[in-house]
Image (tube, grey):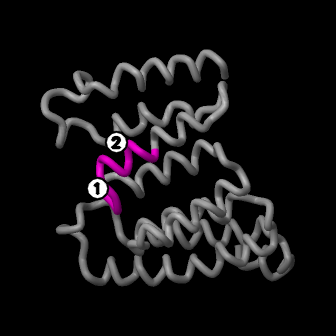
Amino acid sequence: VKAWRTEYPGDPSAALVHADALVSLAGEVRGAQLAKHTTSEQFEGFHRLLAEALPACREAARMAPEDPCPWIAQITIALGLGWAHDDFRALWAEITARDPHHFGAHVSALQYWCAKWRGSHELMYAFAEQAAAAAPPGRRARTMRTGAARAAGCREAKGPVYDQPFVDPAIDATLDAVARI
């Protein structure tokens, strides 16, 4: 990546690959263990690399202003660095201005809004509902209700997740979306 960036300093793809590599490396440094099994050194390296990735993403976005990918790459940074809701909403506005129904962006953003990360079940379900309702027929973003149901799991539900009232409409919307793809 360094050689590519040196040879083609104005290449937005090289800038984005560099930013993505920093985000990936941050994840490797942190490791996949639960937080209680992650050392302070791992967290320090994780946060340092994410902080380095942010200007790299912004550089890629400046080079390719119409491309949603440098903005989407920032979702992982927002998760890892604990961005406030208003900051995340500003990021989301940049993403949706470029591709309002990008499925990968929606899946990643759903994680931000879930209770495990920076939101709550209510915020996650509201996000999924809005995304599914706004997506035109045939777009995979219409399946976000099912993604929210899966992300919630059974942890906080009263009874199995499949018995929750939102599940049947989520499955119906998913089947409809898949049939139109």
Q: How many marks?
A: 2
Q: Secondary structure at mark 2?
A: helix
| CB within 8 Å, label 2 to label 1 | yes
The magenta stretch is 117-127
Residue 146 visible in the picture: yes
State which quadrant residue 20 falls in: bottom right
* Residue annotated with mark 1: 116
Residue 28 visible in the picture: no
Which is the main secondary structure of the residues drawn in magenta? helix
Q: Looking at the picture, which amino acid does disc 1 mark?
A: Lys
Q: Residue at x 83, y 80 (%)?
A: 9
- How packed mark 1 is, by other alpha carbons closer than 10 Å (few <14, some 14-19, many 20 or more), is few
Q: Residue at x 35, y 62 (%)?
A: 118
Q: Residue at x 78, y 77 (%)?
A: 5
Residue farthest to the left, as pictured: 158
- How packed mark 2 is, by other alpha carbons closer than 10 Å (few <14, some 14-19, many 20 or more), is some
Query: In the displayed structure, would residue 60 be above or below residue 167?
Result: below
* Residue annotated with mark 2: 151
